[in-house]
Image: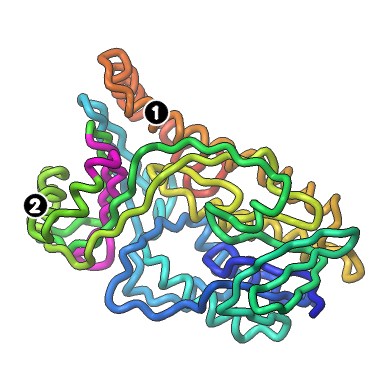
Amino acid sequence: MNFDVVVVGGGLAGAALTVALRASSLRVAVVDAGLPTPSQGWDSRIYAYSPASADFLGTLGVWQHLDADRLCPVHSMDVRGDDGGRLRFDAAGCGLRELAWIGESSLVHRELWESLKRQHNVTVFAPARPTALTVSGNDAALELEDGRLLHTRLLVGADGRDSWVRSQTAIKASSVNYEETAVVANFSCERPHRNEALQWFTDEGVVAWLPLPGRMMSLVWSAPAALAETLMAMTPEQFTRRVQERGGAAWGRLSVVTPPAAFPLRFMRLDRVVASRVALIGDAAHAIHPLSGHGINLGFQDARVLSQRLLSAPAWADPGDERLLRSYARERAEEPFLVQYVTHGINRLFAARNPLAAFVRNLGLNLTDRLPVVRSALTRYAVHGKF
């Protein structure tokens, strides 16, 4: 079977890229281990979608069809250091409507797939797993475990942090294990959160409370591995009490809505994101610490830029052309690099347990809070991906 583009991985980034190619004449295939399934109740995996990502999803006809009752805008954010440092962000003070939207991964994922399944130019292979990749000249041949063979001019790896596609290329990845685990769960709150996000840098890791619709919130606790194991072993009552105490009962009494889930954390940097006939997007191309809340937004911007390159090429152009792929790689070089190393540096600074590091990191928070121009610039970068 012959295609112009084969996307391996139908997660948020891969599905967004596929939907972005809906108006093209390109023959697209999506290979994924399984189709999205409806979640029962609230999804424990929550993302902070930047306004830039919301705009991109809006151009795809996806954002406007999401259930507004499952999304919560963030109007302000309060960041606390571990020794008196504090930094506040306010959307209105920066001329913005919101800093981000907090919503479930599955909410956006399902809507992307609803669009994807209606596309005339898409063939879906799911459940399916790739077993072999051969790149030769103008062709990339992908063999599936059931023996089917897909030929394509461009293979896109959107298959996550442990990307199979990446492992089949000469692209090198360097990783740092943070020895931390993100523990996530959703809670109902006694008091209103007033659309504010809270974040604490503590000696027990980075703790974030993200507002959800109504009186609900999402926890993201990037905890040392040993503490994460302890948290996951607690009863629901013990876990809720620990989370409530960690946040100083900022929103009153909490009640757990979804059981906690855990995701190991690591930093990953690639020497490049393209190879012959191959492009990587999303977590296959970069892994960052969740303290910035920016990971999924990098993936959406990867999909946006790559789709723009493909859509702007002449109809007769080769989608796997080396110049096109190099152009995509160049435009996506700066933002992931900056976000990765800033978040990595902040994580290492707050992980250091010595008085000098404590003084520097909390002084930095306080100084930034006292410089409106710097604070506004940081806010705009987080929102738009540029200063």
Pick the front one: 158 or 383: 158
Q: Seen in the image, is 245 located left or right of residue 297?
A: left
Amino acid beneath label 1: Arg
Toward which corner of the image does residue 331 lie, by quadrant?
A: top right
Amino acid beneath label 2: Arg
Compute the Cα span from label 2 to label 1. 28 Å
**Helix or strand or loop: what does disc 2 sit on?**
helix
Label ID, residue 11: none
Residue 9 visible? The answer is yes
Q: Find residue 307 and report its horizontal and vertical position in percent.
A: 70, 63
Label ID, residue 348: 1
Prevailing secondary structure of the magenta residues: strand
Looking at the rendering, in which quadrant would you find the N terminus? bottom right
Q: Residue at x 66, y 66 (%)?
A: 131
Looking at the rendering, in which quadrant would you find the C terminus? top right
Q: Residue at x 26, y 30 (%)?
A: 81
Q: Which residues are magenta?
A: 204-227
Q: Seen in the image, is 384 located left or right of residue 245?
A: right
Pick the front one: 32 or 365: 32
Q: Find residue 349 and report its horizontal and vertical position in percent.
A: 37, 25
Q: Residues within 10 Å of mark 1 (few under 14, many from 20)?
A: few
Task: Please say if 210 is above or below 206.
Answer: below
* Residue bearing mark 2: 241
Q: Residues within 10 Å of mark 2 (few under 14, many from 20)?
A: some
